[in-house]
Image (cartoon, helix red, strand yellow):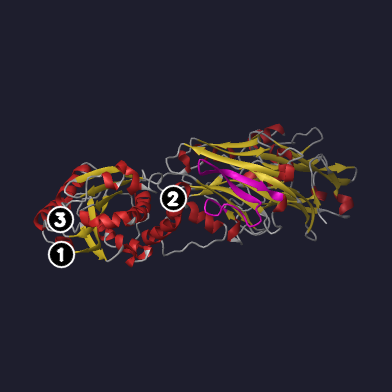
Amino acid sequence: MAVSLSKGGNVNLSKEAPGLNKIQVGLGWDARVTDGAAFDLDASCFLVKADGKVRSDADFCFYNNKNVADGAVVHMGDNQTGDAEGDDETVKVELSKVPADVDKVVFSVTIHEADTRNQNFGQVSKAYIRIVNEENGTEIARFDLSEDASIETAMIFGEIYRHGTDWKFKAVGQGFAGGLGPLASSFGVNV
Amino acid sequence: MQIRKGQRLPLAQLLPENLPDGSFQIQVGMTGLTTEVDFSCFGVDGDQKLADDRYMTFFNQPKTPCGSVSISLMNNRINGFYCTLSSLPASIDRLVITATIDGSETMSRVQSGFLRLVAADRPVAEFAFEGKDFHNEKALILGEFYRKDGAWRFCATGQGFDGGLPALVRHFGGEVADELPTDVAPARLSLEKKVAEAAPQLVDLAKKASISLEKKRLTDVVARVGLVLDASGSMTGQYRRGRVQEVVNRILPLAVHFDDDGELDVWAFSAKPLALPAATLSNYADYIDTVNGGWRKWRMLSYNNEPEVIKEVLAHYKDTAMPVFIIFISDGGVDQNAKIKKLLTEASAQLIFWQFVGIGGRNYGILEKLDTMSGRTVDNCGFFALDDLDSLSEQELYDRLLQELPSWFAEAKSKGIIN
C-alpha cells in the first residue's frame, strides 16, 4: 500500500522495501481538455552534497541533461502534453550507483512557461508524482500536486537522502517562486 | 479571502463552521460584455458526465430534484445558486459553475468577473477574474465543488471552451444535434428566457416560436419587427372579442427574438394610420385595451386605407440599417390595388419584408396576388388568409408567418440589399 504523502512526512525506503536499489520517479497529469495552451510539466532532480549544493552543473538532471553520475540518475524524456497512459515522465535512480559524496537527490516539478501561459498546478487535472520500486513495479509513495500545490508553478516534491546505510524519502511539498531557473540556482547550478 | 485561478481548497476552510444545514450561496457576475451571460450549474458524476439532465440547474430548470441546488435571482436574472451539499445524492460528485455567451463576443471582453461564496449573508471567499485570463472562449467553467477523500473541496477553475455551450455540453458527455446550427441552443434559451423573465404567460408561445425559428434557420437573424393592424369598422367584433389582442400576444415573441430592443412597433389603420407606442413584454398584456386610451378611442373603425399606412411604415424605416419584418393584418375589402401595388413595387429594394395575413375576411384584392407581382427587385411580400385566428395551431401559425422570410433574406443578400 503506497503512502499518500503529506507535507513534511518521511518514510524509510530501505525498510519499506528491503533490498530496494532501483527506483523510478513517475510524474503524470491529464492532458488539457479545455481550450488554451497545453499543460507541460517537467520533472527534474538535483544531486546535492551535505551542504545542499550540487557538486557541479552536471548534477542537475533534466530534459536536456538526461544521464547523470554514470547512469545513477537517468531522465527518461519529456512528454509535452500529458497525453498518454500511465506516467508521463519518468526519472530512474539506481541507489547503489549514487556517488558517495552525494548526500541526497532532490526531485522537483515545474510547469513549463507557467508565467506566460498563466498556469499553475491547480489548473492541471490529476497531476501527481510517485515513487515506484522499479524491480517489482510497486508504488511506495504518491503526492497529489493538483490538490496540494494548487497555485504553485514550481514545486520541490521531495528528496531521497542517506540515513546511515539506509535511504529515506521525505515529502517536502514546498513551492518555489520563479520556475526552474531560480530553483536550479538555489542548488548552486549556474544557469 | 481571495482565491486565485487554479487554487484548490477544502471547502471547510472557506465556510464558517456552524452553517445552518451547511447551506451557502454562490454568487456570480461579469461586466464588460454586451451579450447576456447565461450561468448554469452542472451536477456531474464521478466520470465528470452529466448522467442525469435534471442536475443541470439553469433558468429553465431552477432547481435539482433533491432541491440541493437552486438558482438565485436578482432582477429576474441568475446572480448565483443556493447550495446544500449535504443533501446531494452520492452519485453527484461535482458541481460545476459555468458561464456561456452567444454571438460574436468572447470572454476576453470581460472587464471583471467573480465567483463568490456567501455564507449566512456574508461574503467569505471570492475568485475574481478578468478578460485577459481568456482568449476566444464562449463558455467558461468558473469554479468547481467536488468530493475528495470524504470532504468537499473547491477549485477556481477559470478555463473554458471556444465552442460555447455546445462544447461545454459535449464536455459533460451530452449530445449536440449535428443537423442544427451550433448556436441554436443558446438562441432558443435566450428567447424563452427573456420571455420567462418578463412575461411568463407567453412562455408557451415563445417555445413554439423558437421551434419555427429553428426550422427556418432564423435563430441568429437580427431584425426589427412591426405589426400593422387593420382597425376598419369591419374589425370591431375582432377587437371587442379580444382577437386582436391575441394577435399581439402571438407576434410579440417574434419581436423579442429578432429585435435587440425587444420592441414590437405597432400601427393601426383605418381611413388614417395611427402609430401606437411599441408593444413590449412589460405592456403587452392589455395592450389593445389600454394603449392610447384603448382601441375604442383610436378614432378608427372607418373604411380601410392601406396605402396610407404602408407609406407611413416606409417612412418610419426609411433610414434603418437593420432588416425589417412587417406583419400586416387585414380583414379584406382591399380595393386600392393600384396604389398598394405601386408602393410595394417601389419598396422592393428596401430592407423590408411584408407578411400580409388575412383574418376572417373576404376580397383581399391585390394582397392575394403579391407573390406573382412582377417588376420588383426582390419578392418582398407574402400573404396567407385564415378564416379565424384559431384555424391554425400556434405552431402552424409561426411556421406560416416565417415561411417566406428566409428566401427573402437570401434574395435580398444576393441583390446587395442586405449586407
Please state the chain letter of the residue tagged with numbered disc 1 in the rendered image. Answer: B
**Is B80 contained in the magenta span?**
yes
Sequence-earlier tag: 3 or 1: 1
**Residues at marks 3 and 1, CA–CA distance in whole angstroms:** 13 Å
Do the dots labelled 3 and 1 sit on one chain? yes
**Is B100 contained in the magenta span?**
no
Residue denoted by label 1: B372
- Between residue A132 and residue B100, name the one nearer to us: B100
Cβ atoms at labels 1 and 2 below 8 Å apart: no
| Identity, as a three-letter code, of the amino acid under mark 1 | Thr
Left-right relation of A161 to B81: right
| Identity, as a three-letter code, of the amino acid under mark 2 | Val
Q: Position of residue A89 (x, y in %)?
A: 66, 52
Judged from the image, the secondary structure of the residue bearing numbered disc 1 is: helix
Name the front one of labels 1 and 2.
Answer: 2
Do the dots labelled 2 and 3 sit on one chain? yes
The crowd level at tag 1 (other Cα within 10 Å; few <14, some 14-19, many 20+) is few
For the point 82% across and 35% down, the residue is A50
Res. B377 mark: 3
- Between residue B37 and residue A73, name the one nearer to us: B37
Q: Quarter holding the C terminus of chain A?
A: top right
Residue span colored magenta: B57-85
Cβ atoms at labels 2 and 3 below 8 Å apart: no
Residue denoted by label 2: B195
Please state the chain letter of the residue tagged with numbered disc 2 in the rendered image. Answer: B
Residue A191 seen anywhere in this rendered image of the structure: no
Q: How many numbered tags mark residues here?
A: 3
Name the front one of labels 2 and 3.
Answer: 2
- Quadrant in the rendering for residue B216: bottom left
Q: Is residue B390 above or below residue A11?
A: below
| Identity, as a three-letter code, of the amino acid under mark 3 | Thr
Q: Position of residue A177 (x, y in %)?
A: 66, 33
